[in-house]
Amino acid sequence: MKTKSKLIFASLILSLLLFNNQLTFSQSAWFWQSTVPQGNTLNDVCIINSNKIVAVGGLSTVMRSNNGGANWDIKYRIAGPYKYLSSVFFVNENTGWTAGYQGSVFKTTDGGVNWTLQEALNAYYISTYFADSNNGWITGYFGVIINTTDGGLNWNRQISNVGDYLFSVEFVNKNTGWAVGGNGDERAHIIKTTNGGVNWLIQKTLYNYEVMRSVSFINESTGWAVGDNKLVLKTTDAGVNWIITRTANIANLYGVDFKDSNTGWAVGYEYYFDSLYLYNTKGAILKTTDGGANWIPQVNSSEVTLLSVEYKDNVCMAVGSTGILLKSTGDNDNWISLSKGVQHSLNAASFLNDYTGWSAGREGTIVKTTDSGNNWLRQQSGTYFDLADIQFANKDTGWVVGGYEDIFTGDKFFIKRSVDGGQSWHTQDSGIFPFLSSICFTSNSVGWITGQGGTLLYTSNAGDNWNLRSAGSTDFFKSVFFIDSAAGWILGESGNVLRTTNAGLNWTIRHVSSGNFSSFFFIDHNTGWITSAGNKIYKTTDGINWFLNYAGQNEANGFNSVYFTDANTGWGAGSVYYDTVVIRKTTNGGQNWVNYIVDAGTVFNSIVFTSPNTGWAVGDDGVILKTDNLVGLNEVNNILPDNYYLKQNFPNPFNPVTHLEFGIPLGFGICFFEGL
């Protein structure tokens, strides 16, 4: 039995524009370190047999395993770089279909090795089901249903009689099937056909903002549907009557599949109270052994939403956000993870050398590597709240800033320090400050922190005490950057750059632009760059005056962070270039940029290099990409500092995922240590 459900992602702008003549594309040498084997969201999974498994998802990703998930062959962009794949279905070991956004329907006849485009209607498809090798249906946005009776050579539009999203479709034979969906505002529907879709009739309508996400039938009489707000429906009379129940835990369910009349699974996400008695979410797997009367939570390692579940040949698979892959065999309740990586967005990172580094992000996430990023180990930050920035001065001593929203006492932001390489973290100051965005230490003792409302904090004793300083502005200070103990800059969100040459005793303000700044970087006392909204870069060659260095096409996304290794060579990372995620490189000081298309379909928040060819990019959904052999790039012969620190810009308007927890404004900066 096969079922699918999909989370509605933000619609993409799918028109391919002419490239700016200042930008060219090149082969990429960036590879996944989190999540592995890959980290794009997986929307659906199909178990062909106990060995052959196929999963599909964002960036038109297709994953194929021939040994039960131990190894995967991965293809990206089979539908082009601008589309999602939402569903996959196989009728045998060789023949299958996958469908997604903007009319993407592909067929394979060799088990998923090669895919051929079959349909290109301008529609957004969500769910696919085939009753046999000839008869199939695909549902999607706005009540769309298309049908084929010749294996996909021709597709015909069917009338669903509903205008809502149809998230899931399933047939028990070539005549009888059901589809479920809803619009999230007023109603949800279950529709049925008994003549192959020639006619679809509404069987059940729910109101009060209900949405049904997935449907599963084991025969013509017995089936289940699941959805938001713990919703479970069951019928034993072919849908004439549907009994509504709710799961005991607070969960939104996106997928359901049943083995027989008693045993089934549902997946999604659930709310829970953390140790601070705050609501959080994690992946949910529920199992029933009494036909859906009771659902028991299954222990699993997912901290993110699970979107699809399937059982076949004694194997159960669940997939979801951040490329997570979970597997259970037999009737046991033991779920193992076939993927490895960070499951929360990463906002900042700090590297000491090619081997040792840290990254921090949402929900208190701190991860550390000591083997060049081959393995990232979770560290206990002592908090579930978002971490805005991280910096390590040496292998032992580092700091993070973060916080949370308190509706009763005000927004609380904290500073934490570790003296054992991140194994433990202790709060240095938890006073009520505005948003804290960026850290910069110029030695083991002297450091700065910036934040909203002109917040500037200074310490001369490694953070044992923090003193509030004034820089003469109430702007939101997104980032702070010191090139040595005396010379530093502060980046203001509203277009101002503040500069000091006497260790912060005095600051001068220079208005550069009315645009929204996102990040900046300096290589010496004179040369620096600022990234700004509208895909613009400003540059200074004297540390004081700024000029427009680069103006790309008016992309809303553009650069989020930059890193330079000398006056000419630099890298930029951000979100989307014409709906394609890229990492950029310049060899002429930022006037022109080469785009390296990467295999990640999410936002990059920061980029850092520890040598001319070795670098990392981190970002949303726990993505970590690394390069150690950039294709087509000339090696730069220069001396780099011993410590590298990168910070993220914030707010980040490009993430389509809604986070229930309060997000912290972040900054970008790099600090050069003296005497190390």
Image (cartoon, grey):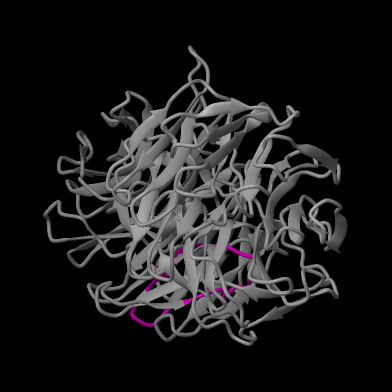
Residue 87 in magenta?
yes
Q: Residue 77: percent from the left, percent from the top?
A: 57, 73
Say which residue appears at 85% left-offset and 54% top-offset: 546
Residue 652, above or below 1: above
Res. 372 image quadrant: bottom left
Please say whether residue 251 is visible from this viewpoint: no
Residue 91, above or below 508: below
Image check: 181 left or right of 373? right
Res. 602 image quadrant: bottom right
In the rendered structure, which segment of residues is drawn in magenta?
A: 75-95
Q: Residue 315: percent from the left, percent from the top?
A: 21, 64
Q: Residue 644: percent from the left, percent from the top?
A: 52, 60
Residue 54 versus residue 552: which sits nearer the camera? 552
Residue 52, above or below 46: below
Say which residue appears at 83% left-offset and 74% top-offset: 22
Secondary structure mainly formed by the magenta segment: loop
Residue 77 in magenta?
yes
